[in-house]
Amino acid sequence: MDDDAAEFAATGGGPGRPAAVRPRGDTRERIQSVALELFAEQGYEKTSLREIAERLGVTKAALYYHFKSKEDIVRSFTEDYVHELDALIAWGSDQPLTADTRALLLARYSHIVSHRIEVMRFLEHNQAAIDHLMTEHGGQDRKKLFREQFLTLRNLLTPPDAPLRDRVRATMAIASVGLGCMLYHSEVSDPAELDQVILDLACELAGVPAPQPADQPHD
């Protein structure tokens, strides 16, 4: 590890913070979080790598050890979100198509969306930039990729050959999770209460009983 990397690890991404306060494994997530904060405050195009480093309390060289550009940061949290959805789809594909499984699928999806809400907001407000970043190195088209994931989740709730009414209900159930988080997350004082309301309504739309809190995913 070079001096710049050691600096970041020792400070934990902030001046005067010992490594025990913020472990090394959290460095990547801390960079992503601070970058999203700045993108939301002043816009993606107007935010520089230097400003991200300053907010973190490290040198630009230390930040450069982890990410070579702000585009790399954006690509990282976009890909993280995609991978989380892929993992959920893989899990759901291995489960029996029961009411309990469908409820847990919605619970896990809601958990991902809630904890990635700032990423979702960024994707929504910077669509052109993300489309460019996703495809410039041969990656998949963002809109096509997310649509495919959405439809796959829908099919895990209700088979493609199900009656139209059931397929529409499943589609609305999944859509309600993202829409509910996007519209209300910044307006509530208790995000956990909102998450439960959204999950209850999504399960109601899907025609399945909402899972008990003990059965739901946690951090």
Image (cartoon, rainbow, N blue to C red):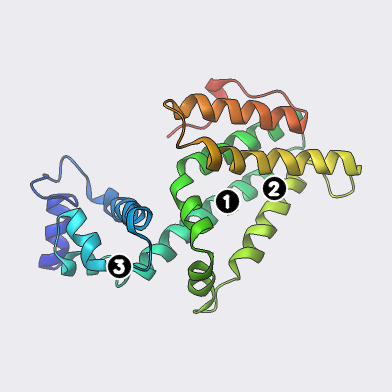
Q: Identify residue type, mark 1.
A: Leu
Of callouts 1 and 2, which one flags the residue occurring earlier in the amino acid sequence? 1
Q: Which residue is mark 2?
A: 153
Q: Residues within 10 Å of mark 2 (few under 14, many from 20)?
A: many
Q: Identify residue type, mark 2.
A: Leu
Taking the image as shown, residue 73 lies to the left or right of residue 216, namely left
Q: Quadrant of the C terminus?
A: top left
Q: Is residue 94 visible?
A: no
Query: x%, y% of residue 26?
Result: 28, 48
Q: Residue drawn at (20%, 54%), measured in percent from left and top?
A: 56
Q: Which residue is mark 3?
A: 67
Separation of marks 1 and 2 at Cα, in angstroms:
9 Å
Q: Residue drawn at (47%, 27%), measured in percent from left and top?
A: 192
Taking the image as shown, residue 116 lies to the left or right of residue 162, namely left
Query: x%, y% of residue 154?
Result: 74, 46
> Which secondary structure, mark 3?
loop
Whether pointer 1 and pointer 2 mark residues with C-beta atoms closer than 8 Å, the reply is: yes
Q: Identify residue type, mark 3.
A: Phe
Say which mark, if any, is on residue 85: 1
Q: Is residue 14 visible?
A: yes
